[in-house]
Image (tube, rainbow, N blue to C red):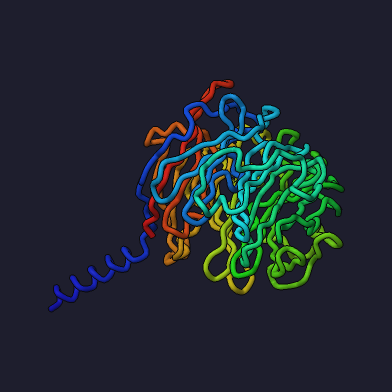
Amino acid sequence: MHLAFLFTAVASLLLAAACIAAPTVSLISNIQLDANGVFFVSYDGVVNVNSFQLSGVLTHGNWQYAGWYTSSRNAILARRQLPSGSWSTLQLPHQLSTNDSHNVIAIGVSPSDGKIHIALDCHSTQMYYTSSEAGLATSGASWTASRFGSITNTLGNLNIGNTITYPQFVVTSDNLLQFVFRSGVSGNGATQLAEYNGGSWSNVGSWASASGTYKSTNGVTSTARNLYIHGFTYRSSTAHVTGTWREQNAGVSCSSAGLTNHDTTYFYSQDKGRSWKNSVGTSIGQSGSNPVNVNTAGIIVDSLNADHALMNQESQDVDSSGQIHAIISYVPGRFTQCVSNYETDRPLYARPFHVYRHTNGTFTKMEIPFPVNSVGRSQIVLDNDDNAYVVLPFVRIVTASKASGWTDWTLAYDGVAEGLNAFGEVTVDRARVSSGALSILYQLNSTGTTPSPVKVIDFKLNG
């Protein structure tokens, strides 16, 4: 009886351990979209797979879309029918204007009319935009460039200016398409919002401004900045935003070769980006008339000075209970209290952290026990059971289960060991995750300006 009891107890423990094991992933396919994608490195990134691209690969309904620049510098759009249809491509009448990795392609779909929207090729410059004929996203009509309108420097009918960066399309909980972008320049810019409704675009306004005063721990004051966001994510009619501030005055950092990014912020909107609240529910701003700024109360959820090479524009997702999860990365103080050069120190010392909100408005931050090994950024997605999957640079996927409280971080796929030869950052298809699959757009590493293949690798999520 004693042995039987012991066996039962051990079996129960093993079963319990199995129940909270970190999720796994299974490789489905690894498909080449283009043998000769344009390649150059600027700002530590490549133009086809920057993390802030947000929707370089996008699922809508039964179709998946991808965008990139080929070696001729032409903008290419591709489409396939899921789950395993072949890819078709078309070439838009626009060429990449300059070797700047910020000039990404962003894809959006307006559910109300089935139009595909494309914004591209801008970094504090005029933007290029086009949209398709109505219904192209749902009809399966032939995939040809003639189904798209002319390339304009306006957002359809709306003139949004000529200093545009980081174009992102998002869909609200009630299926309106919105457009998030920065006006101005790095260190002195405003985060803006526009909305597509009834076939036309309208301006919602700036919701995070450059105004306010920041005094660093070394006593230096900065009077201008911009908010870099990790995402703009809807769940149950609420838009969630995490981000970090970048100051214009380089003196706020302990080193001129550091990054002036500081603090992780969070706030949310329950009226599609018109008004904003901090984590405890206090009203803090109105888009257009009273945007959030660096001195807004109650928005810092993880305080960090500008001495640790905190990265901007990593990623975020929202779980089934409406709580935000973000990935941030920086050089922890155990390595140094002053990053003297982020280009060299981040690959050596940067670590990713999982930052997430509880229902009472408080936040937890936990270090993920795998180094970044790169200057670049990581991506987080949550499956239908709120298990976390983080794609580190070079297509290394680490996972953690909700059942463990996101503590059992495990390496589920190692793109380095598998010989993918991926350039650091990747772009993921967030819209496809709910169907149990993760699509990752990546580009092979190269040298100089030698073109390299652009690929989509697909995994089944085994939560």
| 138 and 333: which is toward the camera | 138
Position of residue 415 measured from the top left corner of the image (x, y, whole percent): 42, 39
Position of residue 416 measured from the top left corner of the image (x, y, whole percent): 42, 36
- Quadrant (top left/top right/bottom left/bottom right) for the C terminus: bottom left
Against 293, residue 419 (above or below) is above
Q: Quadrant of residue 259?
A: top right
Q: Left of 410 or right of it: where is 282?
A: right
Query: Which residue: 49% across, 49% down?
Result: 140
- Quadrant (top left/top right/bottom left/bottom right) for the N terminus: bottom left
| 415 and 55: which is toward the camera | 55
Q: Left of 337 or right of it: where is 253?
A: right
| 463 and 402: which is toward the camera | 463
Q: Left of 12 or right of it: where is 455?
A: right
What is the tally of numbered marks visible in this picture?
Answer: 0
Position of residue 8 measured from the top left corner of the image (x, y, whole percent): 20, 73
Q: Left of 60 or right of it: where is 282?
A: right
| 193 and 358: which is toward the camera | 193
